[in-house]
Image: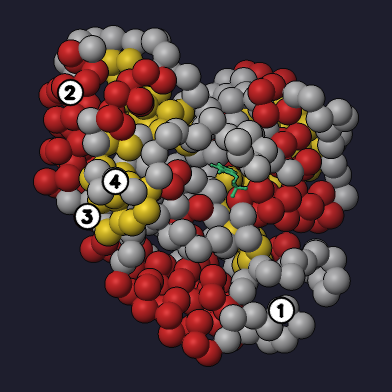
Amino acid sequence: MSALFQNYARRPVHIVEGKGTIVYDNEGKRYLDFTSGIAVCTLGHAHPAIVQALQQQSEKLWHISNLFESPEQEKLAAALVKDLPLAYAFFCNSGAEANEAAIKLARKHTGKHHIIVFEQSFHGRTFGAMSATGQDKVRNGFGPLVEQFTTLPFNDVAALEAAIDDTVAAIMLEPIQGEGGINVVTPEFAEAIQKICDKHDILLIVDEVQTGIGRTGTRFAFEQTALKPDIVSMAKGLGGGFPIGGILGSAKLFDTFTAGTHGTTFGGNPLAVAVAQTIIEHVFDDVFLQQVQAKSAYLQEQLQQAFTDEKFAVQGKGLMLGLYCGGEDVADYVTQLEQAGLLVVQAGPKVIRLLPPLIVSEAEIDEAVAILDKIINEL
Ligand SMILES: *Cc1c(COP(=O)(O)O)cnc(C)c1O
């Protein structure tokens, strides 16, 4: 008997410890963790620098709230927006909350309420974020949604152009749809979105909750596209396992979030900020990001070599990659891979998502691809 709601289809594995890319279950069995807790454990498990940051901060101050000034939040905000077309940050605790802030900011700034979103998108489980999510399985059963979200097909320029009128406050997208199947925004679509936003004075919200913080080989994934967001939401990888989320906004939005308009008790908590600052100092570094790109190229190469049948496709960027297995449901593979010592997560029913920590080694990539090869090509 469980005293938990059964709202997760949990796998019957109890992970108790981890170091880098490797985790162990309660029976001492070793696994390669190519989930990173769903793109969260940026620097792997128990990275000494974040352990130290958390320990040191935990002896000084855990919480004081946003009633008081925070030079630590200021420093983290400045590090996040440095050299980007973004100027200000707001911190919260999760991806859904970050998207709530983004939606509220866009509505308040424009005085309009209509937001264009895309099929197969995922923006979170709170009412605003859920209403923005283009998947019935997320939205069904909860009654009336927040109004004025229009869901369009992803990467369809004609459909987007046809939907634009002067009621539109914002366009909101993930540069690579994570939960929806590792669907990458096409260069044509990114260009069309940016052109439309510029021409019609529409705000652009880029949800980087999964793609951000080095996951795709650059600080944020939008940097590899024509997109120039007014608002970027982030969470998952920002805390490396400590809950923190946030948004970054462009300079013109400054006067919209004035005192009392938005907030959260825990947002930018000293523990979370200490960890996130350490993560950013490691990840927002050209050498580190080049290494992520090199590891990505290596992993893609190894996958191409192992999966030569043309039914397979490797999708994604950086260390956010998907292996499409010819349209079959991959749930059984995920279970078999786990038994063989490789943890992965699905992206939709048909794609095996590979999200190793950004510190994964080539030897660990070799080991993971060997397991993928054995299980998928032999099953
Ligand atoms: C995970 C995710 C969210 C929701 O984040 P939570 O922290 O679970 O609320 C939002 N957007 C994207 C793109 C995500 O991958």
Q: In the image, is 130 to the left or to the right of 190?
A: right
Q: Closer to the observer: label 3 or label 1?
A: 1
Q: In the rendered structure, which disc, 2 or 4, sits on the residue that comes first in sequence?
A: 4
**Secondary element at image label 3:** helix
Viewer-proximal residue among 197 and 113: 113
Q: Residues within 10 Å of mark 4 (few under 14, many from 20)?
A: few
Which residue is at 55% across, 39% downward?
174
Which residue is at 41% across, 20% downward?
331
Q: Amino acid at mark 3?
A: Gln
Q: In the rendered structure, which disc, 1 or 4, sits on the residue that comes first in sequence?
A: 4
Distance between the Cα atoms at labels 3 and 2? 24 Å
Residue position marked by numbered label 3 in the rendering? 291
Residue position marked by numbered label 1 in the rendering? 65
**Secondary element at image label 4:** loop
Distance between the Cα atoms at labels 2 and 4? 26 Å
Residue position marked by numbered label 4 in the rendering? 27
Distance between the Cα atoms at labels 1 and 2? 50 Å
Residue position marked by numbered label 2 in the rendering? 373
Distance between the Cα atoms at labels 1 and 4? 41 Å
Find out whether the residues at labels 3 and 2 contact each other: C-beta distance under 8 Å. Answer: no
